[in-house]
Image (tube, grey):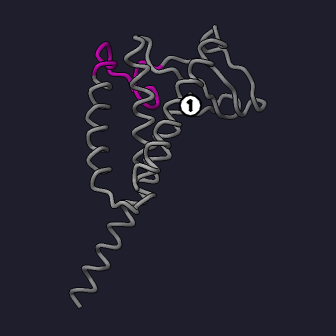
Amino acid sequence: MKAIVAVPVFLVVVVLDFITKAVAVSTMVTAGVPRPVIGDWVRFALVYNPGAAFGLHLGPYSRWLFMTLTVVALGVLWRLYRQAADDDMKKVLAIALVAAGAVGNVIDRIRSELGVVDFIDVGIGLHRWPTFNVADMAVSTGAILLALVLWQEERCQEAALAASES
């Protein structure tokens, strides 16, 4: 039952991320030059990020370090997926989103020493959010959902424990 949600979500995110990055690379030849999409608020600007989220960069070994961390994270996510109940669709959706985003970005790290392709630029004037991609959106959305699901599980366990003690 879990796979009915996890596999399609995972595949759609990975494929959509791959296609949007390919289009960004092929249509935005000049890196860093923004193209307005919705005025100045949403722009497309090709950026290669050799580091992690928010430009975290750890020198010449960043690529290999972040690939290794991604493999470890995918192992943890696989374990969470296997432990998830068949009807826990929120948790399964969250895990699939995070895993797909992680795979999307690790594909970039494997394919190019330049780093992860980012192209979505959001902000107002000089106040901009760090440039991101579809994989980043999946990781962020999935991580927030997973945190909420795990927090809710913890609250339910605490309530059950309190009820059993009284």
Residue 95 vs 155, above or below: the answer is above
Judging by the rendered image, the residue that carries numbered circle 1 is 16
Furthest residue in direction left, as rendered: 165
Q: Which residue appears at 59% of the width and 14% of the height?
A: 25
Q: Which residue appears at 41% of the width and 22% of the height?
A: 107
Secondary structure at badge 1 equals helix
Residue 35 horizontal/vertical position (percent): 72, 20
Residue 155 occupies which quadrant of the picture?
bottom left
Tell me the quadrant of the picture where the N terminus can be found: bottom left
| Residue sitting nearer the eye, 80 or 47 | 80
Q: How many marks?
A: 1
Q: Which residues are magenta?
A: 49-64
Residue 24 horizontal/vertical position (percent): 62, 18
Q: Is residue 148 magenta?
A: no
| Residue sitting nearer the eye, 13 or 68 | 13
Residue 149 vs 138, above or below: the answer is below
The three-letter code of the residue at mark 1 reads Leu
Residue 42 occupies which quadrant of the picture?
top right
Q: Is residue 54 magenta?
A: yes
Q: Which residue appears at 63% of the width and 8% of the height?
A: 30
Residue 48 horizontal/vertical position (percent): 50, 17
Residue 120 vs 8, above or below: the answer is above
Furthest residue in direction top, as rendered: 29
How crowded is the residue under tag 1: few (<14 C-alpha within 10 Å), some, or many (20+)? some
Tell me the quadrant of the picture where the C terminus can be found: bottom left
Q: Is residue 91 toward the left or the right of residue 19 in the image?
A: left
Furthest residue in direction right, as rendered: 39
Residue 17 horizontal/vertical position (percent): 53, 29
Q: Which residue appears at 40% of the width and 63% of the height?
A: 87
